[in-house]
């Protein structure tokens, strides 16, 4: 998903964000809507579309159909602070997230690793998490996998990835041949390939694997964390329109004050994030 050289906490936003509390008021938001400088004016009822994909703990549906997850709840909080009364979560596939921003189908996406390639099409907020990759494997780890290099060395291992996620590129860079990589459109499809034996492992974010395993204990899967010496944790951020500068600055103003606070830590802890995970964003 993201390049190996995970930069500092400002990597996703392209630089520091100056604190401006006035941007976070509903009055300021109303001025933004009326301003001709805003390239994509929001709907009059302060309604924004937010694109997500099913990938616990970042985004998922509860038994009653409610959309939640750490990215969703953080977005809800941000929008409440800048005067947006409500927003519409739009479920999609990973490969459609960025094109949807470009073509105006939604205003913001769930968190993504902010690669140089993606910056050509969209802009990113300041980081909202820093995460390590992991391999989803069947319980027992019969292939004795320990990271990307071990997948490359094991000719019996076929690797599943989700289309356009950065783990595909990471696997290639570590020497996994394209012929041993299976590409899927959704997380669930890739995980099923491991469960059914069509793939020996599925490369994605370790935290996403842990969330999936919690929700599917009968699938008998396990996660192997990619060691930091092989690939360090990388920073992710919300994606917005490339010229949607004022909207991005408003989001960043909220994030700068909220990330690392006790309220933020409590919110993220509900989805399995530790103080150590949060500290990567604030140190």
Image (tube, grey):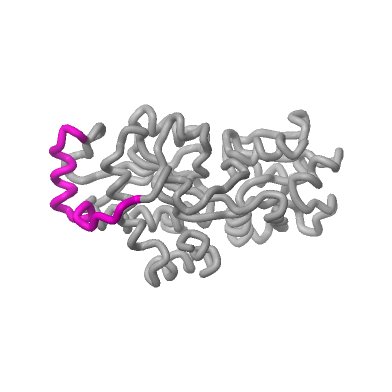
Q: Position of residue 273 (x, y in %)?
A: 52, 65
- What's the magenta bit mostly, secondary-structure-wise? helix
Count of numbered labels shown in the rendering: 0
**Which residue is painted at 20% across and 39% down in the image?**
43
Front one among 232 and 191: 232
Front one among 71 and 65: 71
Residue 226 in sight: yes
User: What residue range appears in magenta?
Assistant: 17-37
**Which residue is painted at 41% across and 42% down in the image?**
124
Residue 91 to residue 146: above or below? above
**Which residue is painted at 44% across and 50% down in the image?**
10
Q: Position of residue 94 (x, y in %)?
A: 51, 38
Residue 187 to residue 282: above or below? above
Whether the magenta-drawn stretch holds residue 27 is answered as yes
Q: Quadrant of residue 228?
A: bottom right
Residue 221 in sight: no
Q: Position of residue 269 (x, y in %)?
A: 48, 68
Q: Quadrant of residue 180?
A: top right
Is 131 left or right of 14, judged from the image as shown?
right
Q: Quadrant of residue 212?
A: bottom right
Front one among 156 and 265: 265
Front one among 80 and 132: 132
Q: Position of residue 170 (x, y in %)?
A: 67, 39
**Which residue is painted at 70% across and 53% down in the image?**
226
């Amino acid at each position: 998903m993201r390049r190996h050289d995970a930069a500092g906490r400002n990597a996703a936003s392209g630089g520091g964000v100056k604190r401006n509390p006035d941007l976070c008021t509903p009055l300021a938001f109303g001025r933004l809507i009326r301003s001709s400088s805003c390239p994509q004016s929001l709907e009059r009822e302060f309604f924004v579309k937010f694109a997500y994909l099913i990938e616990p703990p970042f985004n998922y549906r509860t038994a009653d159909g409610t959309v939640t997850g750490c990215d969703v709840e953080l977005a809800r909080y941000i929008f409440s602070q800048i005067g947006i009364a409500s927003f519409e979560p739009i479920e999609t596939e990973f490969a459609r997230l960025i094109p949807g921003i470009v073509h105006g189908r939604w205003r913001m996406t769930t968190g993504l690793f902010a690669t140089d390639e993606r910056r050509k099409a969209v802009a990113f907020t300041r980081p909202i998490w820093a995460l390590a990759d992991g391999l989803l494997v069947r319980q027992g780890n019969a292939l004795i996998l320990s990271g990307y290099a071990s997948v490359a060395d094991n000719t019996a291992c076929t690797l599943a990835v989700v289309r356009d996620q950065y783990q595909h590129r990471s696997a290639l860079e570590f020497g996994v041949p394209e012929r041993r990589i299976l590409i899927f459109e959704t997380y669930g499809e890739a995980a099923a390939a491991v469960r059914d034996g069509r793939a020996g492992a599925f490369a994605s974010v370790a935290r996403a694997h842990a969330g999936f395993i919690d929700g599917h204990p009968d699938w008998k899967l396990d996660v192997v964390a990619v060691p930091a010496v092989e690939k360090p944790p990388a920073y992710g951020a919300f994606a917005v329109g490339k010229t949607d500068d004022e909207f991005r600055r408003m989001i960043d103003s909220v994030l700068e004050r909220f990330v690392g606070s006790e309220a933020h830590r409590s919110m993220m802890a509900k989805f399995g994030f530790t103080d150590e995970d949060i500290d990567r964003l604030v140190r």
